[in-house]
Image (spheres, rainbow, N blue to C red):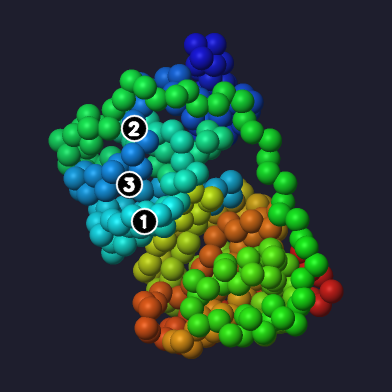
Amino acid sequence: MTELADRYRDLQRSTPHLRARDAALRLGTTEAALVACGATGAATPLRPDWAGLIGALPRAGDVMALTRNDHAVHERHGTYTDVSSGPGHIMVLGPDIDLRLFPQRWAHAYALGGDRPSIQIFDRDGVAVHKVFATSTTDRDGWQGIVADFATADAPPPPETAAAPEAPAAEQEVDGAALRQSWLGLRDTHDFFPMLRQHQATRRQAFRLAGDDLALQLDPGAGSAALRLAAAREVPVMVFVGNRGAIQIHTGTVSTLRDVPGWFNILDPRFNLHLREAGVAAAWRVVKPTEDGVVTSIELLDAAGEVIALLFGARKPGKPELESWRSLVADIAECHAVSPGIVA
């Protein structure tokens, strides 16, 4: 581990702004191992009492929550409120911090100090699933109390070698007509994933089979185009970004957009999104029936068919979809639909 810290410092000298996740990839190790060995700063292991740890975060007051995958980073400022847990999940339903957490995949957690204290949670492969950062408005006494309460000397070491990438989900033969019938019978957007499991279909496979009225393929730039149009029209949106251990949601308008080479960015005071556009292999306009009427989304997938980000119009259960969002998506679909026969 000392050798790993030295290798990390050498890499930092040659590439000073490299993120820990990308540094771990270059070094053939895991981000959790870099954190555990102290390469990124002094780290205190925390007890894997996941419901207790997330449930304690309201004591810290205003913080920044970060959830990411390989191609999108979602950062939201706010307070952890309305925290609840049940078998296999933890939910945070505050007006600013809005999370769906799946701790059965979590394995390691550390508190880092320094100028930008953080609590970082990793899965069993050493991949970061969720991070919480203290800010200038965080209750530092509350933060330190959380760290003290959950610190442990008995944490197992994280893996030092990165796991092999998981193979894309195999696509079984699916009865397209039966899947479409089930899709048309949906009553809630949350029933979509159980429907996929029922038919043993991947998300991308279901999109290909459902028909253009339910899933229309768009070019990969449709997601950032939709967010640009939402900013211009002041249409409030919901932006979902997640991984296999956490999903983070922003609800509201977006306004400050910035492009840097390879990345589309939203840089609002309380919400940041960083989207690696080259990672988007396909975008789809998706329509799901619900008891409140149809719900329309733009869904961004990577080359393996995994979700990068989901975009919806802002809405609450029991309320119909915003007509302004539906109109926006129709305009995006008109400009960005992929020609027939070109399906990713």
Up/down of 170 relative to 230, above or below: above
At numbered mark 2, what does the secondary structure look like: helix, strand or loop? loop
Q: What residue is at 55 percent from the left and 81 percent from the top? A: 186
Q: Please tell me the numbered disc located at residue 47.
A: 2
- CA gap between label 2 and label 3 equals 11 Å
What percent of the width, then of the height, locates residue 230?
A: 47, 73
Q: Please tell me the numbered disc located at residue 51.
A: 3
* Amino acid residing under circle 2: Arg
Q: What residue is at 42 percent from the left and 20 percent from the top? A: 38
Is 227 on the left or on the right of 163, as rendered? left
Categorize mark 1 by other alpha carbons within 10 Å: few (<14), some (14-19), many (20+). Answer: few
Query: Which residue is nearer to you in this view: 199 or 277?
Result: 199
- CA gap between label 1 and label 3 equals 9 Å
Nearest to N terminus: mark 1 or mark 3: 3
- Say if mark 1 contacts mark 3, CB within 8 Å: no
* Amino acid residing under circle 3: Ala
Nearest to N terminus: mark 2 or mark 1: 2
Q: What residue is at 37 percent from the left and 36 percent from the top? A: 48
The residue indicated by pointer 1 is 86
